[in-house]
Amino acid sequence: MRSTVRLLIPLFSLILILLSPAQTKAQNKIKIQGYTIHTDKKGKKTAVPDMHINVYKGADKTDEYASNKKGKFEFQLEFGSAYRIALEGNDRYIDMCFAIDAKIPEAKQNFSPTIEIDFVLIDKDNTDIDSLKFKFPFTKFKYDGAKKFIDDPKYLSDFTKGLFKEYVAAKKQAQAQQAEKERDEKAGANAH
């Protein structure tokens, strides 16, 4: 009986070590998944395979993935860092990226969220888009304080302002017309 107990103690110790919180924490990761998609001028969507997706922690490239033959990509990230996920280094499409702030308190890392996002590919020769905007992340994800990551709505709103050159030109024209109307009204009021 004593020899059986002596054998069981190391076994139970090993089980406790394997089930410790440090081991459980390592299993909680952020799953990133989505598709690389191109939409032509007629609105037809097509999955684009073999697009290179790089993961950066700060300025350091840590991983590289590729979309599969159906355009799908999927990988996991650890909690505790800020990431930039970049689709880059191709000849046909604009380089673009999104950001994830995964620096959350260790006590709140007891979940495994999934972020679903597509890279909607834009041709490099597209003149309707302000491609300089894509030097910055097109969206940023942040922890909502509960159990998921959400788009930062203010950042997304700021990014999309002026994204379409036609919109910017139309807005400038509308502002010029409004200013001209106000000058005309003021001049008319002064004439009386």
Image (cartoon, grey):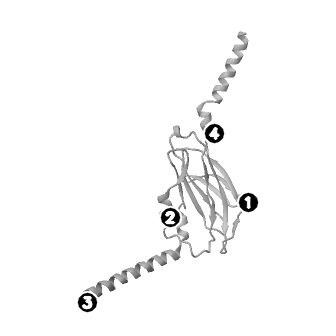
Judge by depth and name the residue closer to the eye, 73 or 53.
Answer: 73
Nearest to N terminus: mark 3 or mark 2 = 2
| Location of residue 135 (image quadrant) | bottom right
The amino acid type found where label 3 is placed reads Ala
Query: Can residue 91 be seen at all in this image of the molecule?
Result: no
The residue wearing badge 2 is 159
Q: Position of residue 172 (x, y in %)?
A: 44, 78
Seen at 67% across and 64% down, the residue is 37
Circle nearer the viewer, 4 or 3:
3
When the figure is inspected, residue 104 is found, relative to residue 8, above or below; the finding is below
Q: In this image, 97 relative to 158: left or right? A: right
Seen at 72% across and 11% down, the residue is 3
Q: In this image, 57 relative to 174: left or right? A: right
The residue wearing badge 1 is 70
Quadrant position of the C terminus in the picture: bottom left
Q: Are marks 3 and 2 in contact (CB under 8 Å)?
A: no
Q: Which mark is residue 191?
A: 3
Q: Residues within 10 Å of mark 3 (few under 14, many from 20)?
A: few
The residue wearing badge 4 is 27
Nearest to N terminus: mark 1 or mark 2 = 1
Q: Secondary structure at mark 1?
A: loop
Q: Secondary structure at mark 3?
A: helix
**C-alpha distance separating marks 4 and 3:** 77 Å
Seen at 49% across and 58% down, the residue is 153
Nearest to N terminus: mark 1 or mark 4 = 4
Q: Secondary structure at mark 4?
A: helix
Nearest to N terminus: mark 4 or mark 3 = 4
Q: Position of residue 143 (x, y in %)?
A: 52, 48
